Image (cartoon, rainbow, N blue to C red):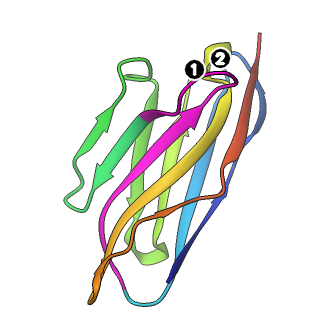
Amino acid sequence: QVQLVESGGGLVQAGGSLRLSCAISGNSFSFNAMDWYRQAPGKQRELVARITSGGSTNFADSVKGRFTISRDNAKNTVYLQMNSLKPEDTAVYYCYAHLASTTGTLDAWGQGTLVTVSS
């Protein structure tokens, strides 16, 4: 069993920056990939960014050039650095870990963290 704990959300003015963290804790597992999703009020959850075990990254077109994703293996933590924030980035952000254990897949969601960007 694993647990994902998110932190770093908050209120920021447009043009500002925030860094979200998603820390993975639990029993032995291997890391395959981590996704960051977001869900704005009244909208569907959308994939924002992904990082794989090999370090490959992908971003939604809406955040390319503004967001970066990175991983600290020693801390089992993935970060989403968000720069040049816009009001339309306001949403609850969720991390989703693609993990594996000796018995199979071990995917898990974080609890979500609210990001509010004021104009």
The local secondary structure at tag 2 comes to: loop
**Magenta region: which residues?**
29-47
Mark 2 and mark 1 residues within 8 Å of each other at the beta carbon: yes
Residue 10 on image: x %, y %: 78, 39
Query: Does residue 86 appear in the picture of this structure?
Result: no
Q: Are there few (<14), some (14-19), or many (20+) residues within 10 Å of tag 1?
A: some
User: From the viewer's perspective, is 86 left or right of 109?
Assistant: right
Which labelled disc corresponds to residue 15?
2
Residue type pointed to by label 2: Gly
Which labelled disc corresponds to residue 84?
1
**Does residue 49 lie above or below 96 as drawn?**
above
Query: Does residue 53 appear in the picture of this structure?
Result: yes
In magenta stretch: residue 102: no
Residue 116 on image: x %, y %: 75, 28
**Does residue 63 lie above or below 87 as drawn?**
below
**Does residue 91 lie above or below 70 as drawn?**
above
Residue at horizontal 35 percent and vertical 19 percent from the top:
61
Residue at horizontal 60 percent and vertical 48 percent from the top:
20
Residue 4 on image: x %, y %: 57, 67
Residue at horizontal 28 percent and vertical 37 percent from the top:
58
Picture mark count: 2
Q: Quadrant of residue 104?
A: bottom left
In magenta stretch: residue 46: yes
The local secondary structure at tag 1 comes to: loop
Residue at horizontal 32 percent and vertical 50 percent from the top:
51
Residue 89 on image: x %, y %: 61, 22
Q: Sequence-wise, which precedes: disc 2 or disc 1?
A: 2
Q: Main secondary structure of the magenta part?
A: strand
Which labelled disc corresponds to residue 104?
none
Q: Are there few (<14), some (14-19), or many (20+) residues within 10 Å of tag 2?
A: some
